[in-house]
């Protein structure tokens, strides 16, 4: 397989996995928010339920968050009387436990057959063999990322049925659902680890991971509006507003007033193009941020990508393949100096 074809398949794998995860995550987040907490806050409740007496640093490790992020969420959950802290042997550390209210929030956020959650849309999409293949590949990736501890969490999450009420599902459906939950958690760990790996080298370019992702989308869809960017990226309009404002102030994009009220057409600037290309050559083409993918055979990458394409189509991510082709074409044409 030629290098360009191999790099395209790596580019495809990452983005297909990323957009499948984001679609499920954003849908799940909307469902949870109706209960009065956020999905990340619920995820902390799950982690404490699975590991009673867990420390803040361990919550951060399992959840793929920074300690300051977890600290802020912990404060909110304590203020809502969903968790409480116990002093550990080390006087400076704390162990966290659920309150009755915290357990109640886990219970009311259990999804069932009547709920419109995208995880259920994946039931019947893959055979057991195909799900096992996806799990095997991402399990290998997670092991290379030295995050084997996530497997214990996923196993206990499934054993305790914390996410889904399985009462109305038959035995085969239950098995498929549990494997699908495993795929979802493995995808999440993979994507957030790549984000973490990529964030540090991006400091050299004076850009954040989110800003870089926005630049890729704007490069793929010239003249895109902020609302379209919000839809494709799965960011809220307020988040997009901040990202666009920062990219514009750094001269990475151009803004042109659109006919729609309070809307702008967004285009990447020459400086923005150079940033994407420099970052791609330094951090992606070298597989610096994709170290874990190096030992996967080209045949397995192609097979995995075909399954991830199927997942994105079922989830309604119709622009994902177009985005992947356009962004890689942009990189190739830049390499040729066109």
Image (tube, rainbow, N blue to C red):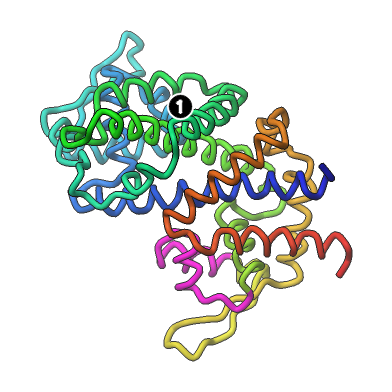
Residue ID at (72%, 58%)? 328
Residue ID at (33%, 28%)? 175
Name the magenta segment's main secondary structure: helix
Dot 1 alpha-carbon crowd within 10 angstroms: few under 14, some 14 to 19, many 20 or more: some
- Local secondary structure at mark 1: helix
Residue ID at (26%, 28%)? 171
Residue ID at (60%, 44%)? 305
Q: Position of residue 134 (x, y in %)?
A: 52, 33
Q: How many marks?
A: 1
* Relative depth, front residue between 5 and 236: 5
Q: Position of residue 59 (x, y in %)?
A: 38, 27
Residue extending farthest to the bottom is 259
* Relative depth, front residue between 67 and 13: 13
Magenta extent: 222-246
Please identify the quadrant where the C terminus is shown: bottom right
77 on left or right of 204: left
Q: Is residue 237 magenta?
A: yes
Looking at the picture, does residue 125 appear above or below residue 179?
A: below
Q: Position of residue 146 (x, y in %)?
A: 57, 21
Residue that carries the numbered disc 1 in the rendered image: 61
Residue extending farthest to the right is 337
* Relative depth, front residue between 189 and 113: 113
34 on left or right of 180: left
192 on left or right of 163: right
Q: Position of residue 69 (x, y in %)?
A: 41, 39
Please identify the quadrant where the N terminus is shown: top right
Looking at the picture, does residue 244 appear above or below residue 211?
A: below
């Amino acid at each position: 397989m030629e290098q360009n074809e191999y790099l395209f398949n790596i580019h495809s794998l990452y983005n297909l996995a990323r957009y499948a995860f984001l679609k499920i995550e954003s849908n799940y987040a909307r469902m949870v928010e109706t209960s009065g907490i956020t999905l990340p806050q619920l995820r902390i409740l799950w982690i404490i339920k699975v590991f009673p007496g867990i420390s803040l640093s361990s919550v951060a490790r399992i959840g793929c968050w920074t300690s300051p992020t977890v600290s802020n969420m912990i404060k909110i959950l304590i203020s809502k009387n969903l968790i409480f802290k116990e002093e550990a042997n080390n006087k400076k550390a704390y162990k966290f436990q659920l309150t009755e209210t915290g357990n109640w929030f886990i219970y009311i956020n259990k999804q069932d057959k009547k709920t419109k959650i995208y995880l259920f849309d994946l039931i019947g999409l893959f055979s057991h063999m195909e799900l096992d293949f996806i799990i095997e590949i991402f399990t290998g990736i997670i092991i290379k990322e030295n995050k084997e501890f996530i497997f214990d969490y996923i196993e206990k999450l499934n054993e305790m049925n914390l996410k889904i009420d399985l009462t109305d599902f038959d035995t085969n459906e239950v098995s498929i659902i549990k494997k699908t939950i495993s795929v979802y958690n493995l995808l999440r760990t993979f994507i957030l680890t790549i984000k973490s790996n990529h964030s540090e080298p991006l400091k050299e370019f004076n850009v954040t991971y989110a800003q870089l992702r926005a630049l890729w989308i704007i490069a793929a869809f010239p003249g895109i509006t902020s609302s379209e960017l919000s839809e494709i990226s799965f960011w809220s309009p307020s988040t997009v507003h901040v990202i666009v404002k920062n990219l514009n102030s750094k001269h990475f994009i151009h803004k042109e007033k659109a006919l729609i009220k309070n809307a702008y057409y967004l285009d990447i600037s020459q400086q923005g193009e150079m940033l994407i290309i420099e970052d791609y050559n330094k951090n992606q083409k070298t597989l610096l941020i994709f170290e874990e993918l190096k030992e996967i055979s080209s045949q397995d990458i192609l097979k995995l990508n075909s399954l991830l394409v199927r997942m994105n189509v079922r989830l309604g991510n119709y622009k994902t393949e177009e985005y992947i082709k356009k962004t890689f074409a942009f990189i190739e044409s830049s390499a040729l100096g066109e």
